[in-house]
Image (cartoon, rainbow, N blue to C red):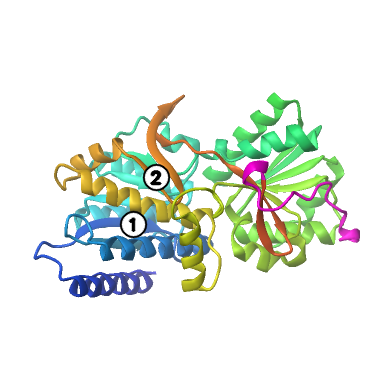
Amino acid sequence: MRISAFGLLAVVSCLILGLGFGLGWAADPPIKVGVVLPLTGEQAKFGEIEKNSLLMGLEEINKAGGINGRPIELLIEDDTGKPDVGRSAVEKLISQDKVVALTGGYSSSVTYAICAVAQQRKIPFLVSTGSADKITEQGWDYVFRIAPPVSEYPKALNSFLADVVKPQSVAILHENTLFGQSGTKEFAEQCEKAGYKVLMKEGYEAGAVDFKPLLIKVKAAKPDFVYMISYVMDAALLMRQSKELNFNPKLFVGGGAGFTLPEFAKNAGDAANYVFSADLWSPQLPYPGAKEYFENYQKRFGTPTEYHGAEAYGCIYVMADALKRAKELTPAAVRESLAATDTMTAFGPVKFVSYGKKKQQNALPTYLVQWQKGILETVWPKNVATKPYVYPVPEWSQR
């Protein structure tokens, strides 16, 4: 892990220096911003897409002149998907590297641990993904989040269920971390409020190799639909084994996360077809730079990007905007500048507001997507759909 993180940092530093020499930066040193993401371990695919997107944005910003003539330098650390490693990484970034601000944060468990350190050390932290609701419900002054909380992921799904599916019952499966538990609690409450009977809520340990005992139990309960909060390898295995068991609810729906990555379709194969998922972004949305970001990412890395990458890409632009407006380059001044953010990014509009228990939370609409022949199509709401939804979903034997 250390070798990987150090190597990555060296690459990033060379990149910055290279851009700096090319542009003839002034004598002032780069502005250091710390990043913590999972670059190894089970969540590495999420970390990779966010790291790539941050670096793309960084290159564009520095190429355009940086922050009032100074480049941004990203110091990227690997949290390995573990809260204690993430906590140590952010302590290093603050104490040793002297970063002026932080961004990144994928898993909710790790992000929550980093937030506590950032708040205690008074270093502004712009969260890209970590979505458990409680992250922006602690009254923390130094924590900001660009993405919606997990309780809001199913907003578009809920209107689709009410208008099209009209289900009577649901089974909810989730990985047993802060993200899965928080999302399950919130979605179960929304289902009960809508009048859908929650037949079961079952957690599992991420990285399981056999979901069939769990799926047999779900199949016996006969839910109208199954909602799953899973990372990518678990998501693919759940669908492959559902097909093997000939389990045919009215629809399978993912709660974002692993169900929108390109690796889900690759690993699930034809069992991915017609699976729905909550989603937070689409390149077809009318946000300036959204389509260009998608096309440039695909051209550069040879694979599509999706909402996790767009969150990170948006974050580096929000951070640059805040650094430009800060009265001075101190953590306190950058925090004040972030709090006053009101800007547009390729991920969507960004303005940190308070509502309910939440503080310094960006508020955005969400979407419903469906895998159709290996392509992730936006299907709801209709005004942003790239393809009509396929529903009723044919049984496995008829696909």
Q: Residues within 10 Å of mark 1 (few under 14, many from 20)?
A: many
User: Residue 376's x, y, as percent?
Assistant: 65, 58
Mark 1: secondary structure: strand
Query: Which amino acid type is shown beneath numbered disc 2?
Result: Met
Q: Which residue is mark 1?
A: 35
User: Residue 367's x, y, as percent?
Assistant: 61, 44
**In the displayed structure, does residue 351 sit left or right of residue 305?**
left
Residue drawn at the location 61% of the way across and 56% of the way down: 260
Q: Quadrant of residue 382?
A: top right
Where residue 277 is drawn, which disc sits there? none
Instruction: Give the prevailing secondary structure in the magenta stretch.
Output: loop
**In the displayed structure, does residue 305 sit left or right of residue 272?**
left
The residue lying toward the viewer, choosing from 25 and 2, is 25
Residue drawn at the location 91% of the way across and 60% of the way down: 397
Q: Which residue is mark 2?
A: 344
Mark 1 or mark 2: which is in front?
2
Query: Which amino acid type is shown beneath numbered disc 1?
Result: Val
Q: Looking at the picture, does residue 289 appear above or below residue 10?
A: above
Label 1 vs 2, first from the N-terminus: 1
